[in-house]
Amino acid sequence: MAEVVKMPKLSDTMTEGVVSKWLKKVGDKVKSGDILAEIDSDKATMEFESFYDGVLLYIGVPDKKAAPVDSILAIIGKEGEDISALITNSGVLPDKQKSEGTGQKSEVISQKAEGVSQNSEVKSQKTEGKSLGSSSQFLIPKTETNTNTNGRAKASPLAKMLAQEKGIPVTMLRGTGDGGRVIKRDIENYSGSIASAFVGSESFEEVEISQMRKTIARRLAESKFTSPHFYLTMEIQMDELIKAREAVNSVASVKISFNDLVVKAAAASLRKNPKVNSSWLGEVIRYNHHIHIGVAVAVEDGLLVPVIRFADGKTLSQIAVESKTLSQKAKDKKLQPQDWEGNTFTISNLGMFGIEEFTAIINPPDACILAVGAIKENVIVKDGQILAGHTMKVTLSCDHRVVDGATGSAFLQTLKQFLENPVILLGAPSI
């Protein structure tokens, strides 16, 4: 008996998937464990295996098309098996090609399929027009001309002579003489310049929204509009941390980044301020005893947040290696669910792009997210003296349902203490 293969749910936030590429075609023999297709979830591209033996009789979702979770993805059965009932019951009508491939001979379904095909063709034409955009040439219109019906300018001979000497196009001027006639004073009073007519074109491109971008939009909109955000910004002197990083990297086998140091300092600060390491769950507030820090990574389609687990118990070298590995997996779309689930606090760093200060939207279910800006050479006052130094601004976005201003401020003060005094930070645990 034929088996229906449904669109899998590859992550906890996935509502629909896109078939990136079919590796089998209708009529191919399939064994359990064979890779049927590559499917894009909202997090990554994953290979989807067959659980059945048989022949691929039907493909329900073409390449590059999206379908909801649990919708019909494919049908596997015996060669020549009639699957029209399965397709009809699923609410999907096959096109002519698929009907022939399955041996379907129902006239009624064939007529419906033909109707669907025609509608699809119309829709395809509309979509094609939309994806190509529209392009139209236009000439910047004149507000008014002062030409006769025969095309000659309405101007006095003296005005024409003066206009020619000054390089002023008479036809572009609004005359103050009788009937809009351009006269001498119009030329003399003219103080601007007439731009030559410019021929340009309008164009645009519309691109289908990726599954990742849809999920980002949905989750961040939910966060922004349901969590009452407030923001706390603090400036941190970075000269001692810069020296400490140089010293560490001179002997360490793994190069440490400033972001690795921020992750380490944030984890230590969360241990001292556990109320920030929390989540709003509707009826209860969850205070997490473990510290899993999500680190936002920019990828081609948007933003992914792989998680460094038990960050407070790891050395700087361990954090550096894990951070680099997860970042590369995110860019290669190779992250697995265990790589992005379970965060209790998130860090978003735009300092490498030269952004001095910004606010980030909380990454659910966290109660807070730390936005890290660029390290900037600045004038600072230290022990009553004006000196040149380096500073960095951080902004903590807080869910006011969970974290109050005093709680968030205490966390930032602890973070500042660790970053400005790296000897304390590097003392527990050791590198």
Image (tube, rainbow, N blue to C red):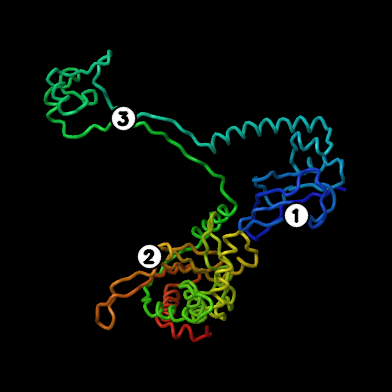
Q: Which mark is residue 35?
A: 1
Dot 3 falls on a residue whose secondary structure is: loop
- Disc 1 or 2, which lies upstream in sequence? 1
Q: Which mark is residue 71?
A: none
Which residue is more in the foreground, 408 or 344?
Answer: 344
Tell me where residue 410 sits by quadrant. bottom left
- The CA span between labels 1 and 2 is 47 Å
Residue 417 relative to residue 164: left or right:
right
- Residue 252 in the image: state x and y as whole percent: 51, 80
| Residue annotated with mark 3 | 197
- Disc 3 or 1, which lies upstream in sequence? 1
Which residue is more in the foreground, 231 or 228?
Answer: 231
For the residues bearing labels 1 and 2, Cβ distance under 8 angstroms: no
Residue type pointed to by label 2: Glu
Which is more foreground, mark 3 or mark 2?
3
For the residues bearing labels 3 and 2, Cβ distance under 8 angstroms: no
- Residue 365 in the image: state x and y as whole percent: 56, 66
- The CA span between labels 3 and 2 is 43 Å
Tell me where residue 107 sits by quadrant. top right
Say few, some or many: other residues with alpha carbon within 10 Å of mark 1 (under 14 / 14 to 19 / 20 or more): some
Residue type pointed to by label 1: Ile
| Residue annotated with mark 2 | 356
Count of numbered tags: 3
